[in-house]
Amino acid sequence: MGKSSKDKRDAYYRLAKEQNWRARSAFKLIQLDEQFDLFSYKEPEKCSRVVDLCAAPGSWSQVLSRVLIKGESFGRRAWMEKMDALVNEVNLASQEAPEASIETEVGSLNLKAQKPVLQPRTNVKIVAIDLQPMAPLDGIIQLQADITHPSTVGRMLAALNPEKSETEYELVDLVISDGAPDVTGLHDLDIHIQSQLLYSALTLAIRVLRPGGKFVAKIFRGRDVDLIFAQFKLLFRRVHIAKPRSSRASSIEAFVVCEDYTPIPGWTPDLGRPVNIPDTAKTSIEDDLENIPEQKRIVRTDGVVELSLPRKEATELRQNNRWIAPFLACGDLDAFDADATYRLPPGHVSLEPVQPPTAPPYKAAIERKRAEGGMYGKTKNKGQISNTT
Ligand SMILES: C[S@@+](CC[C@H](N)C(=O)[O-])C[C@H]1O[C@@H](n2cnc3c(N)ncnc32)[C@H](O)[C@@H]1O
């Protein structure tokens, strides 16, 4: 596929290059933030200390660095700030009260002027971990490590709190993980490996998350995913499954967004025995069950129809250690569709990727193929290859 052709078929790939992101995944994190306010600036949700797991080539770390360290904003938040600035300008010109009406394509908008709120934050600490090396990024502490290896816990704690001991350290507000194995195409195997990464990410997260903290991780939606959701729901009061518009509908990928971490008293996670949460733990699932309305269909005042599982069925699921997480599609409806092909703007020049992988796992294979003369057997020394392959 030519470069321009990929630009047409994947609007987010093109936008990532134009907006200087190392990978199109940046938009997934931005759209998740639009929905869940992951980078909240308000107490008690304020976010300034973050661990980014499986971070290479680093587009999520770029988002963290630009939002938390530089105080920039993106997506819906940026649009609202732009509107506020516009209102301020209108008011300044008319010397009126701090409210204004602006005519837009979709009618008039009554906006209340506010000062832009995002500022560079204090006490920011961002640690990025990946198996692969990653090109440096301003303000990001990088660690090359395997998140499934028990030694990574100590290394992560040391990176977060260099001057403190392993038992006395500052906790973090948010842990994000975009970990994915090299997919084989065998769905069951890919989902199994992905869930091992997910459990490792969760185990690392609960070693460092503050009570009330958030955890976001990539998940492959497989047959028994409700078993995994039930485990998350033991530790977090709110759990959603989210699909950003920049994630292709055709892919089994989604993101589990867990909010309000509630530690289980007396229980310490262990990478060697993934999750292993005591059955007796009273959790928010039980609280939710008590609150399930008898009606299955509720029409909210804003017109949204909420459908819920009847209490009897939800209780049966719980008895089988299963729980169904509410699903949310996120990202504005007018955002680009990741599965659509778009016409390129006139005069479009296809850009090179911002940061090619530093040492991808397939590097050795490519070098070997090159040395052998290339693909499809067009080799310099064919005889030698047929002997070795
Ligand atoms: C989809 S990429 C992450 C993209 C990244 N979030 C970004 O925005 O640039 C998945 C990453 O998971 C990493 N990974 C896979 N298994 C891992 C493991 N066991 N430990 C650490 N990183 C791992 C891979 O090296 C790869 O860089």
Image (cartoon, grey):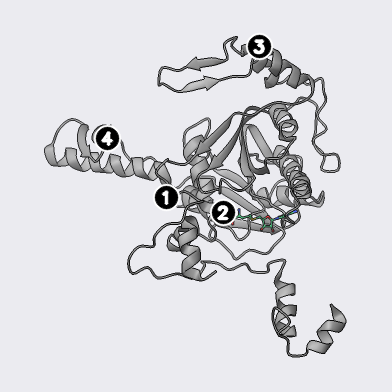
The residue type indicated by label 4 comes to Ala
The residue under label 1 is 72
Does any atom of ligand 1 lie closer than 8 Å to the CB of label 3? no
Query: Any mark on residue 41, and which?
Result: none
Which part of the image, by quadrant, shows the N terminus?
bottom right
Query: Marks 2 and 1: CB-CB under 8 Å?
Result: no
Q: Distance between the residues labelled 4 and 3?
A: 42 Å
Which of disc 1 and disc 3 is earlier in sequence?
1
Q: Residues within 10 Å of mark 1 (few under 14, many from 20)?
A: some
* SS for dot 4: loop
The residue type indicated by label 2 comes to Ser
The residue type indicated by label 3 comes to Glu
Does any atom of ligand 1 lie closer than 8 Å to the CB of label 2? yes
Which of disc 1 and disc 4 is earlier in sequence?
1
The residue under label 4 is 113
Which of disc 1 and disc 2 is earlier in sequence?
2
Query: Any mark on residue 290, and which?
Result: 3
| x and y, in percent, of residue 129 in the image | 68, 54
Residue ID at (69%, 18%): 314
* SS for dot 1: loop
Q: Quadrant of ligand 1?
A: bottom right
Asked whether, in this view, residue 302 is left or right of residue 325, the answer is left
| x and y, in percent, of residue 4 in the image | 46, 68
Q: How far apart are marks 4 and 2 (CA)?
A: 31 Å
The residue under label 2 is 61
Asked whether, in this view, residue 133 is left or right of residue 344, the answer is right
Front one among 299 and 61 = 299
* SS for dot 3: helix
Asked whether residue 175 is in view, the answer is: no
The residue type indicated by label 1 comes to Glu
